[in-house]
Amino acid sequence: MKSVTLLGATGSIGVSTLDVIAQHPERFSVFALSACRNVERLFQQCQTFKPRYAVLTEPQAAEQLYALLQQVDLPTQVLVGEDALCQIASDPEVDYVMAAIVGAAGLKPALAAAQAGKRVLLANKEALVMSGQLFMDAIQASGAELLPIDSEHNAIFQCLPTQNRQQGVQKLVLTASGGPFRTWAKERLINVTPAQAVAHPNWSMGQKISVDSATLMNKGLETIEACWLFNVSMEQIEVVVHPQSTIHSMVTYCDGSVLAQLGNPDMRTPIAYALGYPERLLSGVKPLDFIQLARLDFERPDTERFPCLRLASEAHQAGGYATIALNAANEEAVQAFLKQQIGFMDIPRLIEQVVVQARAGTPTTLETIFIQDKDSREAALSWIKTKKMQ
Ligand code: NAD
Ligand code: MG
């Protein structure tokens, strides 16, 4: 029986994780659940999974949850704030931690799980983009297990050799759906609305990652994520647009072999793989219907219409501070775009402006990571403010 903490339980990944866990009550128990402010959903989840702890980031939401739990007489203890997130991620009784908070907010608790030697199921790619070296060092030092949840990285994990993970590997090929604007002309992209950007053709996901998929920043962040996870250079990574999202990614070998992992686009597959590893578990995902699928298409990504892919690669080459700036500027740009303060094509423009201001080199402490994060957010917000006044 494995005891699981879910960071970001009320989100798209959190809900899919609980769906898989519910299919295996003999294998997993839920130790703790967390959310930012979605009291209603967290309360429902507490009633179903009866965790020891429920953590909310917002104090008011925590009070509401506390009142609701009193009414139903559940033993779940309500905690509040970031320290509580780190506590439920590192508690000695916890075996597995699903890191599924979106954005920089997830870094400290994910790192706490890594330092405490847990099996870390990493969905929160922004954490790794911000802290790559520090995070991987923490995993090494504590003997934690790091299992990627991002479908591309989970696919690559499945396609790599089990013993010597680098042996004979030539390239990691990350597939990208191309997002909702794959076929749109550059001029049309200027007028994209938030509603159009969050409507992903193949995957159902949270708002932020949906916009990232539309700009291709999601793929950019994923190339950086892959460099850290699999200890490869940016040159060893190739991005291929594959509109069906059936091949989740591939590994090419020096003998000409290519291994791919295929399946329906449903996050319960990588989640079940990481929960069960090295065993396979039922996930509830429908089997792939090859006849209905009929074909697999591939295209070269267009970095002129989608500059974020290039920006991510350049930032990674520049160093750790630049990737922190890239992530911070992107988070602020996406929020401003969703609030209709800036246009879709302003997103890469803003990011480029902020990344050039980043310090040189790579930070070695969490403190310096968050200083760069804060500086870059301020630079992004002032860019947005100027833009709004125009
Ligand atoms: P989501 O927006 O649906 O959910 C985010 C979760 O994080 C929610 O539970 C929310 O309450 C919590 N949260 C948000 N802000 C917070 C804060 N400031 N402090 C504490 N908690 C906070 O997002 P999602 O789509 O589930 O994505 C989660 C992470 O997984 C992201 O990093 C994303 O890139 C990654 N990911 C998602 C998918 C997917 O299919 N959804 C696929 C691959 C990777
Ligand atoms: Mg992905």
Image (cartoon, rainbow, N blue to C red):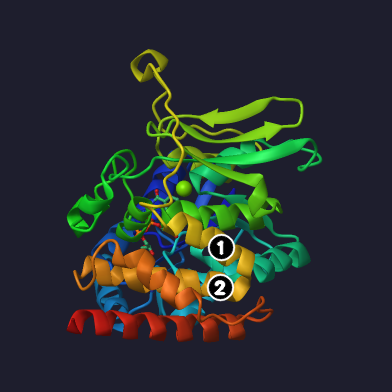
Q: Residue at x 35, y 74 (%)?
A: 332
Picture coordinates of residue 313, whole percent (x, y): 55, 58
Q: Is residue 155 above or below residue 291?
A: below
Q: Residue at x 33, y 70 (%)?
A: 333
Question: To which quarter of the image does residue 66 belong?
Answer: bottom left
User: Which amino acid type is shown beneath numbered disc 2?
Assistant: Ala
Residue 40 in view: yes
Q: Which disc is residue 131 wearing?
A: none
State how many labels appear: 2
Q: Is residue 181 left or right of residue 114?
A: left
x, y percent for residue 328: 44, 74
> Is residue 124 visible in the rendered structure shown here?
no
Query: Does the CB distance between marks 1 and 2 fall below 8 Å?
Result: yes
Q: Is residue 250 above or below residue 349?
A: above
Q: Earlier in the sequence, mark 1 or mark 2?
A: 1
Task: Classify 10 Å Cα crowding around label 1: few (below 14), some (14-19), many (20 and above).
Answer: some
Q: Secondary structure under badge 1?
A: helix
Q: Which residue is mark 1?
A: 314
Give the residue furthest to the top.
291
Residue under pointer 2: 322
Q: Provide residue 178's location: percent of width, then percent of height.
A: 38, 42
- The foreground one among 132 and 2 is 132
Give x and y (percent) for residue 91.
60, 70
Ligand 1 contact, mark 2 (Cβ < 8 Å) = no
Q: Residues within 10 Å of mark 2 (few under 14, many from 20)?
A: many
Amino acid carrying mark 1 in the image = Glu
The one nearer the camera, 71 or 293, is: 293
Q: Is residue 310 left or right of residue 205?
A: right
* Above or below, 297 relative to 231: above
